[in-house]
Amino acid sequence: MTSPAPASTTASTPASPALRAIEATLTRANAELPALAPLLAAFGPLFAARARLRETAPGWTGPLPAFDAERFCQGVFVLAQMEHGQGFQDMSASLPQAAQHLLPVMAASFPALADELHSLLGAVESGELAPQALAAAAFGQAVAVPGVSAETLAFALSELVRPFVERQAQDLNALTKDVSWRQSMCPVCGGAPGMSVLRRIKDEAEFIQSHGGRRFLRCSCCATEWTMKRVSCPACGCEEPDELVVLHDPTRPFERADACRRCNSFVLCLDTGDMVDVPDVDVAALTLLPLELQAKAQGFAPLAKHPWSEL
């Protein structure tokens, strides 16, 4: 399989910072980790296509929902505070056009799924799968599409709605600014973290940077990030050194898997503290696949599954 093609741009429409970060991270990863080239070639174009959709997605429309800071501090995430369990706003009207953009990219990236993805696109374009049914299926409602397996349908639709979910979450996250959140689940949607990132954060009051970097968990559903105590298990809160395990490759000291013997869970971690060029987090997660496999081989389970793990 060939290396991923860079996101298409023209002189009049230069690549956005997000797309440039994806391209740069893919280029660097292909040079450093040639064994992962097929994986990078498959998911790189998908990540770029998702980024383009996210940049044009409408975000949260109308007033932001009512927010109770006291309930939030007690562990009630933003969407759980909404009446009738409303969740993210209806994005169904945007999905047919998004499917025309995203599904051909996925079919080219995943040849083994191409026939099923073309069948899915045909069902969308013909109206056999209405926009409302498309959205409902993306959020877990059982829907059957002839010629498409349940596994492929779940994979494709989760990727299809992700840009819209992430864009809405960006707006909703503004509600949580400066409000304490100490939970392992996402403060916006309640999703599990699929990744953690260490970042050096400058303290504007003291003109210093936090030693070693602050730890951010990244939601596997909506990409919201929130801080978490650095030396602790995000799943069970264990802080005992003898129970916490760090798996790493000495040749790549900025990558690791943080595991916990008490609850047998793990989360991947990227340390960007000493990096000049910070990589795109989604692409960087791909490069941690060897550590993910190592953690699973030792009996640890991920807090959230990555799509490439399922494939």
Image (tube, helix red, strand yellow):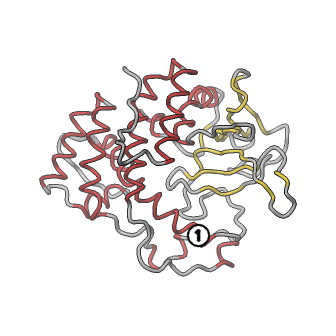
| 256, above or below 176, in the image | above
* Left or right of residue 219: residue 56: left
Nearest the eye: 19 or 49: 19
Res 267 quadrant in image:
top right
Instruction: Left or right? Give the position of 59 relative to 182.
Output: left
Mark 1 crowdedness (10 Å alpha carbons): few <14, some 14-19, many ≥20: few
Q: Quadrant of residue 243?
A: top right
> Where does the N terminus fall, quadrant-wise?
top left
Residue at numbered disc 1: 174
SS for tag 1? helix
Residue 34: give x, y in percent of width and height.
51, 18
Residue that sits furthest to the front in the current view: 11
Image position, residue 234 (x, y; %): 70, 50
Q: Residue at x 35, y 55 (%)?
A: 138
Amino acid type at mark 1: Ala
Most extreme residue toward the left is 126
Placement of the C terminus among the 4 image quadrants = top left
Whether residue 227 is situated above or below residue 27 in the rendered picture: below
Residue drawn at point x = 57 percent, y = 66 percent: 173
- Residue 168 in the image: above or below residue 199: below
Residue ranking furthest to the right: 206
Q: Residue at x 21, y 34 (%)?
A: 115
Q: Residue at x 45, y 27 (%)?
A: 39
Q: Position of residue 133 (x, y in %)?
A: 25, 61
Q: How many marks?
A: 1
Percent from the top left, x then y, of residue 277? 64, 38
